[in-house]
Image (cartoon, grey):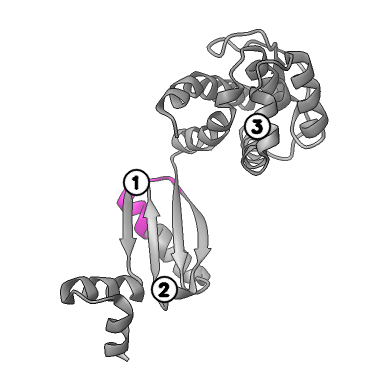
Amino acid sequence: MSITLTKVAEPYVEALLDLAESLDSTGSPESFDSTDSPESLDSTSSPESSDSTIEFRIDKDMNLISESLKNSSDLKKMLENPLISKDVKKNFVRDIFGKCIGDLTLKFLFVIIDRGRTDALKTICDNFEEGLNKRKGVVIARVTAADFLSTAQQNSLILLIKRMTNAKQIKFAFRYESSLVSGIIVEVGSIIVDVSLLGKLKEISNLLGVEAPYVGELLL
């Protein structure tokens, strides 16, 4: 991820987080004018139905937009093309996302288009969840396991990670990999805990100076 784009994205992410947090605290969903600066996104009445917090809904919207940009190079190129007018881009975005995302998020996209920062849109979307989790004291634990973890195992893992990080809440991102044979690999930020059999085999192979598969054969 570009350091420049991260710096560009930061004030937009913080402004959107501040707005969502403020609206959640007042229980009054609102929208903002697309000509406002990211530091001063003022609001005007525009009710939006909800079955959860505004922050949560915007986070879901951001994930959808990020995945769309990731999976469609044409969408990304279109939004970043300086020869295409802002109005055309807005209409295009409304046609694609209008029925999938909230009114507040749609208007935020218009802010990005009006200010000519669509090059940073994916970075903004990706960093929103990170910023939200940081504010809420939530830690993302990326778990790679050889098999599905039971509820008891997940609860034990939650207690362990909370002790390690002092987090208020743990969210898991699971990935299952049969090559691990048994055990798990847990990634929390820059911390990696490898308690898989494959990890142990690699440790032994490094000590012996041979490939892990041959060590596996020795242990069978």
**What residue is disc 3 on?**
76
**What residue is disc 1 on?**
166
- Of the 4 image quadrants, the one containing the C terminus is bottom left
**What residue is disc 2 on?**
180
Q: Amino acid at mark 2?
A: Leu
Question: Magenta stretch: residue 161 in it?
Answer: yes
Q: Secondary structure at mark 3?
A: helix
Q: Secondary structure at mark 2?
A: helix
Which of the pair 93/164 is nearer the observer?
93
Q: Which residues are magenta?
A: 160-169
Q: Secondary structure at mark 1?
A: loop
Q: Amino acid at mark 1?
A: Asn
Question: Magenta stretch: residue 114 in it?
Answer: no
Q: Position of residue 98 (x, y in %)?
A: 80, 30
Q: Quadrant of residue 57?
A: top right
Which residue sits furthest bottom? 220
Q: Position of residue 175 (x, y in %)?
A: 51, 62
Q: Amino acid at mark 3?
A: Lys
Q: Main secondary structure of the magenta part?
A: helix
- How far apart marks 2 and 1 lie (CA) works out to 28 Å
- How far apart marks 1 and 3 lie (CA) works out to 38 Å
Instruction: Tell me which numbered mark, 2 or 1, is placed earlier along the sequence.
Output: 1
- Of the 4 image quadrants, the one containing the N terminus is top left
- Left or right, residue 167 beside residue 81: left
- Label 1 or label 3, whichever lies nearer to me, is 3
Q: Quadrant of residue 97?
A: top right
- Label 2 or label 1, whichever lies nearer to me, is 2
- Label 3 or label 2, whichever lies nearer to me, is 3
- Left or right, residue 156 beside residue 75: left
Instruction: Classify mark 2: residues with Cα within 10 Å, few (<14), some (14-19) or many (20+).
Output: many
Instruction: Tell me which numbered mark, 1 or 3, is placed earlier along the sequence.
Output: 3
